[in-house]
Amino acid sequence: ETGVTQSPTHLIKTRGQQVTLRCSSQSGHNTVSWYQQALGQGPQFIFQYYREEENGRGNFPPRFSGLQFPNYSSELNVNALELDDSALYLCASSQQGARETQYFGPGTRLLVL
Amino acid sequence: GENVEQHPSTLSVQEGDSAVIKCTYSDSASNYFPWYKQELGKRPQLIIDIRSNVGEKKDQRIAVTLNKTAKHFSLHITETQPEDSAVYFCAATSGSARQLTFGSGTQLTVLP
């Protein structure tokens, strides 16, 4: 198992609400990437954080936003939730010198009703 | 952007047989290709990776091959065991963030 942790494990929200998901990176890792995994599909890149700044972004609208803290942990915020936001949200941590070698957390399963 | 295609979507093999999963990618600038195993309800687990300066890499029963010219790479599992049953994802790096673009996954079932 990796040292990447995420909270909460499960979450149920209603359409239009806002949600915050949290991720703690593996020891020694300073880069966090977030992915959305819809049922039966591969993970899709949302964005990446390094040195508390967004370092790259996938094809997701601005209502998906994030933060990274000095201890390298990270948050994913989603505003104005839509039914299609229901998915498993995964964070992955890596070292800046090898950002592509990513280790995933267990994910947060979000259900939007 | 990068596009990764993976096949087959499902694969059933008898215990002890070999399994092969194939992926193609579109971005010639991609140079890192990991494979992840995801068991039901669990996190994707990195099982092997290969960089573009290498044609083949082995780790016990698992091997990955890369053909840069054809832009395809494959996962080979030998002497399959029931615990190999899972969904396997290939991926390729792209972009300034070195983000992973994943294939659609292969459900591997090893029949005892």
Image (cartoon, coloured by chain):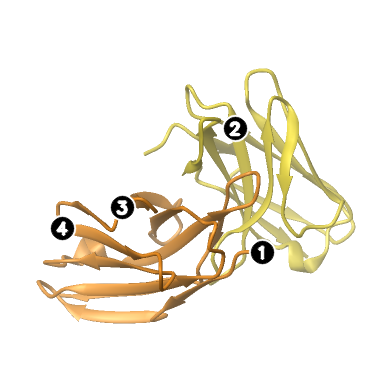
Whole-number angstrom distance, CA of label 1 to CA of label 4? 33 Å
Q: Secondary structure at mark 2?
A: strand
Instruction: Tell me, by letter, which chain the rendering colours yellow.
Output: A
Q: Residues within 10 Å of mark 4 (few under 14, many from 20)?
A: few
Identified by mark 2, the residue type is: Thr
Residue at which label 1 appears: B1
Of marks 3 and 2, the one in the foreground: 3
Q: Residue at x 16, y 67 (%)?
A: B80
Query: Mark 4 sits on what residue?
Result: B61
Amino acid marked by disc 3 = Val
In the rendered view, would you say B65 is above or below A24? below
Q: Which residue is mark 2?
A: A31
Residue B86 appears at what percent x and percent y?
34, 65
The disc label shown at residue B12, or none: none
Mark 2 vs mark 4: tell me if same chain: no
Q: Locate the N terminus of chain A and report the quarter of the image it occupies.
A: top left
Q: Amino acid at mark 1?
A: Gly
Residue tagged 3 = B54
- Chain ID at mark 1: B
Q: Nearer the viewer, mark 3 or mark 1?
A: 3
**A14 lies left or right of A102:** right
